[in-house]
Image (cartoon, rainbow, N blue to C red):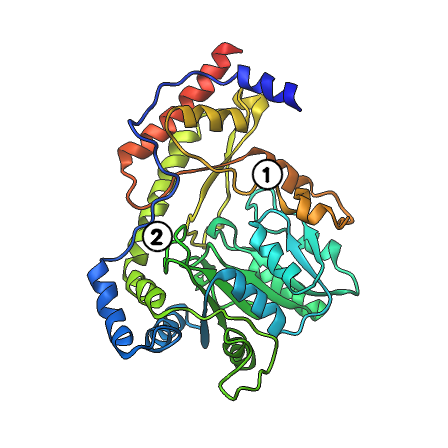
């Protein structure tokens, strides 16, 4: 392993810093503090600091925006996923994409359930419904899919699969607040969808999550679940946790809703620019988005084919870092290669060939609303220089 690493290091081109200081991978755009405090102040003054009026206002505003019957605010997307699985009463296996952030899998483990990993589509990088179908057994009770980077899943195929096999369908929509599938807002699909409001997302609450559902019974159980399972009678209805959202976090998110459309527009513009500038380079490929879908571009990622590009993914990341450009390898390694999941000896009946390929080549680039066109162009140019410099060395 060490010799492989040394060999790669020899092929990292020397690139002078493009920026005087390190270009951050992410920099959240937040609303004016005065606006947040104005929304928060009444609750603060009344001493109602958690899960009170502003949380209710946020839930109502989100339900209206996403055209869904119920929205339940929680402390994080992870706790939201944990509570959804618990409230739905799932006891069997859950089909989960391996190419995702590990919190998706953690929510399954926290409930004492067994994830069965499914492969992803080679073009959209979201879970492949056909491979999910291959992994279903009599023990499977649910599908937990992910709108990866904000790119909507093949919702319709997953819904048909869930209906045919009488499975629960949950979407990890951590990246997808503002996404749409065939013109319909993400948040309307399956038994529930769960969003993240952490600082890397477009809608920011500092920390927090939202669960949307059209199921009144599920919504009721989730409201109990976020309060230790208690709806107020001091007689818990299920084993819940403390997953309440604070009023300040809700005020931050509520104020941020006004910024969302501008953020979506800017991120899509940046993504289009990156793709246009990078497409001529050999060996690079990009996430495919269906024509009628809207992508949040919570992350903008590329794949690097070392044979064609003349540089490995890891060498390119190191070259960009030397140029003062931060990148991430979202999501490498995939879940089925991580020690927490390997130790149980869980295997799928098929090899996760697309997942292995994409995870080994993926590199996520800086993308956030305050990036200027000049900065985006400079990042793309640095990638071109890294690639060409390595080819010249070769």
The label nearer to you, 1 versus 2, is: 1
Find the residue positioned furthest to the top. Answer: 393
Q: Secondary structure at mark 2?
A: helix
Q: Secondary structure at mark 1?
A: helix
Instruction: Please indicate whether residue 318 sits to the left or right of residue 135 in the image.
Output: left
Q: Position of residue 305 (x, y in %)?
A: 56, 28
How far is the residue under mark 1 from the one under mark 2?
26 Å
Q: Is residue 321 visible?
A: yes
Residue for point 71% across, 57% down: 133
The disc at residue 359 is 1
**Vertical arrangement, residue 47 with respect to residue 93, above or below:** below
Q: Position of residue 168 (x, y in %)?
A: 64, 69
The disc at residue 164 is none
Residue for point 65% across, 38% down: 356
- The residue carrying pointer 1 sits among few (fewer than 14), some (14 to 19) or many (20 or more) residues within 10 Å by Cα, namely many
User: In which quadrant of the rendered image does the N terminus lie?
Assistant: top right
Q: Nearer the viewer, residue 283 or 315?
A: 315
Quarter residue 384 falls in: top left
- The residue carrying pointer 2 sits among few (fewer than 14), some (14 to 19) or many (20 or more) residues within 10 Å by Cα, namely many
Q: Position of residue 72 (x, y in %)?
A: 46, 73
Instruction: Please indicate whether residue 48 sits to the left or right of residue 198 in the image.
Output: left
Q: Nearer the viewer, residue 341 or 167?
A: 341
**Vertical arrangement, residue 282 with respect to residue 346, above or below:** above
Lower sequence index among marks 1 and 2: 2
User: In which quadrant of the rendered image does the C terminus lie?
Assistant: top right
Q: Position of residue 144 (x, y in %)?
A: 61, 60
List the residue tagged with mark 2: 264
Instruction: Please indicate whether residue 366 sits to the left or right of residue 108 in the image.
Output: left
Residue for point 29% across, 75% down: 43
């Amino acid at each position: 392993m060490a010799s492989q690493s040394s060999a790669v290091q020899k092929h990292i081109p020397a690139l002078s810093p493009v920026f005087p200081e390190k270009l951050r991978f992410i920099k959240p755009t937040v609303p004016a503090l005065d606006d947040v405090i104005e929304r928060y102040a009444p609750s603060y003054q009344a001493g109602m600091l958690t899960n009170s009026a502003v949380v209710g206002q946020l839930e109502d505003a989100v339900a209206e925006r996403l055209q869904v019957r119920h929205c339940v605010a929680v402390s994080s997307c992870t706790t939201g996923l944990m509570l959804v699985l618990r409230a739905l009463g799932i006891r069997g296996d859950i089909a989960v994409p391996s190419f995702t952030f590990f919190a998706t899998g953690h929510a399954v483990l926290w409930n004492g359930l067994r994830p069965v990993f499914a492969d992803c589509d080679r073009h959209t990088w979201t879970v492949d419904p056909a491979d999910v179908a291959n992994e279903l057994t009599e023990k499977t009770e649910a599908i937990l899919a992910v709108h990866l980077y904000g790119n909507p899943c093949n919702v319709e195929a997953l819904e048909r699969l869930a209906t045919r096999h009488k499975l629960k369908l949950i979407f990890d929509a951590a990246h997808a607040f503002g996404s749409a599938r065939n013109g319909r807002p993400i948040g309307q699909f399956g038994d529930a969808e769960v969003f993240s409001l952490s600082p890397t997302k477009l809608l920011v609450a500092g920390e927090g999550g939202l669960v949307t559902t059209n199921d009144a019974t599920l919504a009721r159980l989730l409201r109990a679940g976020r309060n230790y399972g208690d709806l107020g009678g001091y007689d818990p209805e299920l084993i819940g946790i403390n997953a309440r959202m604070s009023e300040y976090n809700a005020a931050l998110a509520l104020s941020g809703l006004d910024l969302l459309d501008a953020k979506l527009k800017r991120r899509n513009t940046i993504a289009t620019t990156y793709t246009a500038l990078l497409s001529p380079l050999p060996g690079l490929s990009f996430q495919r988005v269906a024509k009628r879908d809207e992508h949040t571009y919570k992350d903008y990622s590329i794949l690097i084919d070392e044979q064609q590009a003349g540089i490995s993914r890891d060498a390119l990341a190191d070259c960009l870092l030397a140029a003062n450009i931060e990148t991430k390898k979202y999501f490498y390694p995939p879940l089925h290669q991580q020690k927490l999941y390997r130790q149980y000896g869980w295997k799928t009946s098929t090899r996760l060939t697309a997942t292995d390929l994409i995870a080994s080549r993926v590199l996520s680039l800086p993308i956030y609303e305050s990036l200027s066109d000049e900065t985006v162009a400079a990042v793309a140019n640095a990638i071109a220089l890294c690639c060409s410099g390595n080819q010249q060395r070769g």
